[in-house]
Image (cartoon, grey):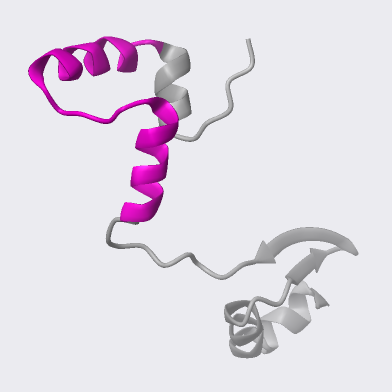
Amino acid sequence: MELALREAKARLSELVAAAEKGERVVITKHGRPAVELVRCRKRGGIDFDKLEATRRRLGIDGSSAEEMAEWKARFEDTVFSRQVLGLDYDE
C-alpha cells in the first residue's frame, strides 16, 4: 500500500493496522517514497534454541575457567565479537 502523506494522516489508524498484519505500507512525500511503516518485532525473553545454535557454531560448549578465559580472549577480537553480535564483517 502506498499513500501520500496527506492521505496517510487521515488514515493513520488503518495504516498501522495494515502494518501490524505484515502489509507493506509506504508513505510518499511529493510523489517519492519517504517512509515505510513496519510491524515492531516483539522483544523480550531469550531464544534459547538460537542461543544454543550460536554457541555450537562458535565452538562455545563448556564453562570451565580455562574455557571462559579463552572465550574472553576471543571476544576481545573485533571479528569474533561482530560474529557473536550477528554483524557482517568485511575486511
Side of 80 where 14 appears, left or right: right
How many marks on residues?
Answer: 0
State whether residue 90 is above or below residue 16: above
Picture residue at 81% right of the left edge, 78% below the top: 1
Residue 53 among those drawn in magenta: yes
Which is nearer the eye, 65 or 84?
A: 65
Q: Position of residue 5 (x, y in %)?
A: 75, 73
Q: Is residue 88 left or right of residue 56?
A: right
Q: Nearer the viewer, residue 24 or 10?
A: 24
Residue ID at (71%, 80%): 8
Judged left or right of residue 71, residue 52 is right
Q: Residue furthest right?
A: 31
What secondary structure predominates along the stretch shown in magenta?
A: helix
Image location of residue 73, percent across then percent down? 26, 9
Give coordinates of residue 42: x percent, y percent. Answer: 41, 67
> Quarter of the image holding residue 65?
top left
**Residue at position x 47%, y 64% from top?**
41
Foreground pick, 14 / 6: 14
Q: Is residue 16 above or below residue 40?
A: below
Q: What residue lies at 77% left-to-right and 83% top-to-bottom?
A: 7
Q: Which residues are magenta?
A: 48-77
Give percent across and percent down for residue 81.
39, 22
Looking at the image, the residue that sits furthest to the left is 65
Quadrant holding the C terminus: top right
Q: Is residue 80 magenta?
A: no
State the image quarter where residue 61 is shown: top left
